[in-house]
Image: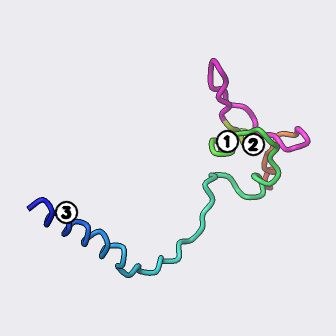
Amino acid sequence: MQKSTAAISLTLFVLAGCAARTPDVAVEETSPYTIPPEVIAAAGPNQDLFSAEFDETDGCYWYYHAGQVETTRVPLRAANGNQLCRAPSI
């Protein structure tokens, strides 16, 4: 009885590998970031872009830096050290 159960299980596993795959539906590629691509390109290294967000009150981008003791909200900076902000609309 045990041999026939093992043979049936093995046969099912082999046949499952022969099953036809359905073509993957085209998935629209989206960015994992919540900020625009231009800001990502301008951002300097060693900043957590996954936690970056736009602050409506000051018009600048901020991110959360996880330190050894606490997590602090700090401004997102460009490679040259300038803070990344949107130009005020007129």
User: Given contact means CB atoms under 8 Å apart, are the residues at marks 2 and 1 in contact?
Assistant: yes
Which region is colored magenta? 64-81
Amino acid type indicated by mark 2: Cys
Amino acid type indicated by mark 3: Ala
Residue at x 41% of width, y 79% of height: 21
Which residue is label 2 attached to? Answer: 60
Nearest to N terminus: mark 2 or mark 3: 3
Quarter of the figure with residue 4: bottom left
Residue at x 87% of width, y 40% of height: 82
Nearest to N terminus: mark 2 or mark 1: 1
Q: Indicate which disc residue 55 carries.
A: 1
Is the C terminus in the top left, top right, bottom left or bottom right quadrant?
Answer: bottom right
Which residue is label 3 attached to? Answer: 6
Q: Nearer the viewer, residue 4 or 80?
A: 4
Residue at x 87% of width, y 44% of height: 79
State how far apart marks 2 and 3 are (Cα).
64 Å
Label 1's element? strand
Crowd band around label 1 with a 10 angstrom C-alpha radius: few (<14), some (14–19), many (20+): few
Position of residue 29 relative to residue 81, above or below, is below
Q: Nearer the viewer, residue 24 or 62?
A: 24
Where residue 75 sits in the image (x, y, percent)? Answer: 75, 35
